[in-house]
Image: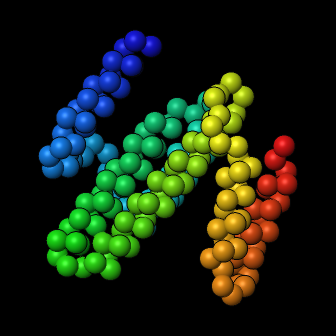
Amino acid sequence: MAQIQSLMRAVINFYNFNNRNAPVVITRVKEHDSERMCMDRLERAIFDSCDEDCKATPSRYAIWGEDIRSLSISAKEAMKNGNIEQAEKSMNQVINSMGAFIDAQLILSNLPGNISFVKSKDIIKSYITSLLENNEASDPETDYLIDSMKEIMNSIE
């Protein structure tokens, strides 16, 4: 345990040290097509997290993290080139993917033996509220998503 903590401390210290300067980009894993595959890769990592026997979870999160970094770099380059629309599109993907990661980790923290800060039911409830508030006109896809989330919320104790 002490060794892994030392390794993690080194990671944090390295990125904190370099945080003041330019971004640090050391590509270790790259699967290409970050723009299209980012959420799919996060999905694989999240579902691996649900399986105690899965050994690929950290690697899958690393690949997803590389997608996030790649999209962020693309957004930065688009801003430099004056392509604000493309920069915003890339940053929206980063923000939404990070939101999915955060919520998935919070939901996993509700598993037995973990310390929980946010109830899973509250996360799903916030999704329903957001969809209802942002849905000016009813459409079948949004209605289906809301209904399925209501079912999930009602099944949570």
Quadrant, the N terminus: top left
Residue at position x 42%, y 67% from top?
Answer: 92
Extreme residue in the left direction: 21
Foreground of the two, 33 or 99: 99
**Residue 69 percent location from the top left of the image:** 31, 53
Colour pattern: rainbow
Residue 44 in sight from this viewpoint: no
- Determine which quarter of the picture holds residue 34: bottom left
Foreground of the two, 77 or 51: 77
Q: Is residue 94 left or right of residue 113?
A: left
Residue at position x 66%, y 62% from top?
Answer: 127
Q: Is residue 64 left or right of residue 45?
A: left
Extreme residue in the top direction: 2
**Residue 46 percent location from the top left of the image:** 57, 46
Q: Is residue 32 above or below residue 3?
A: below
Foreground of the two, 77 or 44: 77
**Residue 81 percent location from the top left of the image:** 17, 76
All told, the count of numbered labels is 0
**Residue 130 percent location from the top left of the image:** 64, 68
- Determine which quarter of the picture holds residue 2: top left
Quadrant, the C terminus: top right
Residue 60 in sight from this viewpoint: yes
Q: Is residue 80 above or below residue 56?
A: below
- Determine which quarter of the picture holds residue 133: bottom right
Q: In this view, does 65 lie above or below 8?
A: below
Residue at position x 54%, y 54% from top?
Answer: 100
Extreme residue in the bottom direction: 137
